[in-house]
Image (cartoon, rainbow, N blue to C red):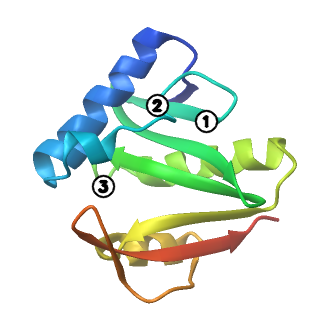
Amino acid sequence: MEVRNVTTNNDLQKVFKIRKEVFVDEQGVSLEDEFDDFDTLSDQCEHILVYYNQEPVGTGRLRIVDGFGKLERICILKPYRKFGLGKEIITSLEKITKEKGLNRVKLHGQTQAEGFYHKLGYQTSSPVFMEDGIPHVLMQKELM
């Protein structure tokens, strides 16, 4: 397993392929809702790729929003779930957040993943809301 920062358009296309398979094909999110203006290589957003056996199988991104590191678009291809890769994505995005001088992170977690985020120290801080037709909650964590 290896986590890499996305620095090339070729790697960004791998990110998009994973997100399309998970969010669009598997979960039914529309293409228009899944991809946005932050899906570029810029200072506004950082993307990471997780590799398992040299294959790109997971991704996530980080934006700075209202003094928080906002973790977004976290996903892993279905055959590679349960290998601990989700934890690696979160840990890597938290590390980037700290490198940027911030000590708070937040995310919109799907309710089916709420327990996973609790295990990583996140607290639920909102009632359930719908995002792209999927129930979510706002979750936050103070970084040490």
Amino acid type at image mark 2: Asp
Q: Quadrant of the C terminus?
A: bottom right
Q: Which residue is mark 1?
A: 45
Q: Which residue is mark 3?
A: 82
Contact between labelled residues 2 and 1, with CB atoms less than 8 Å apart = yes
For the residues labelled 1 and 3, the Cα–Cα distance comes to 27 Å
Pointer 1 local density, CA inside 10 Å: few below 14, some 14–19, many at least 20: some
User: Is residue 60 visible in the rendered structure shown here?
Assistant: yes
Of residues 81 and 140, the one nearer the viewer is 140
Q: Residue at x 67, y 72 (%)?
A: 141
User: Is residue 1 visible in the rendered structure shown here?
Assistant: no
Amino acid type at image mark 1: Cys
Q: Secondary structure at mark 2?
A: loop
Residue 88 x/y as whole percent: 52, 47
Residue 90 x/y as whole percent: 55, 53
Of residues 125 and 49, the one nearer the viewer is 125
